[in-house]
Image: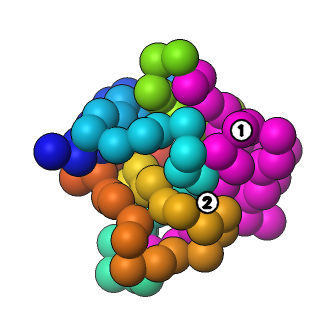
Amino acid sequence: QVQLVESGGGLVQPGGSLRLSCAASGFTFRSYAMSWYRQPPGLERELVAAITSDGDRTNYADSVKGRFTISRDNSKNTVYLQMNSLKPEDTAVYYCNAGPVYQIPTAYDYWGQGTQVTVSS
């Protein structure tokens, strides 16, 4: 049974930091590209960051470049999203995604249940 379990979300003040984790099981983690998406209230889901299966390449949405860092540990079947200098507009539900194609959603992707990140004073 495939599982992607996100953790690390919560309430943080503007300028603060959070580290999201996504623990994967039930599939060959090292063979999948991993991504983080987010869905702000009332808006569409958007790609935040992506990393290749071997971790050699990453890509970020313009809105988070220089503030967020995606990484993975294939020995732990876990992907991370380090979020620094958080802004109120980063408030969203953050989803972990595993897919066979880097940066391109497919029908074969797996999704986590999401974790809420709220940036507010």
Q: Which residue is mark 1?
A: 54
Residue 48's disc number: 2
Residue range in magenta is 45-74
Q: Is residue 95 left or right of residue 17?
A: left
Verify whether residue 51 appears in magenta: yes
Query: How are the colours assigned in the image?
Result: rainbow
Where is residue 118 drawn, in percent x and y? 39, 46
Give the residue displayed 51% in from the left and 75% down from the top. 105
Where is residue 93 drawn, in percent x and y? 35, 56
Which amino acid type is shown beneath numbered disc 1? Asp
Give the residue displayed 23% in from the left and 52% down from the top. 113
Where is residue 44 drawn, in percent x and y? 43, 82
Task: Spot the residue most to the left.
Answer: 1
Verify whether residue 28 appears in magenta: no
Image: 86 above or below 47: above
User: Disc 1 vs disc 2: Cβ atoms closer than 8 Å?
Assistant: no
Q: Is residue 66 left or right of residue 52?
A: right
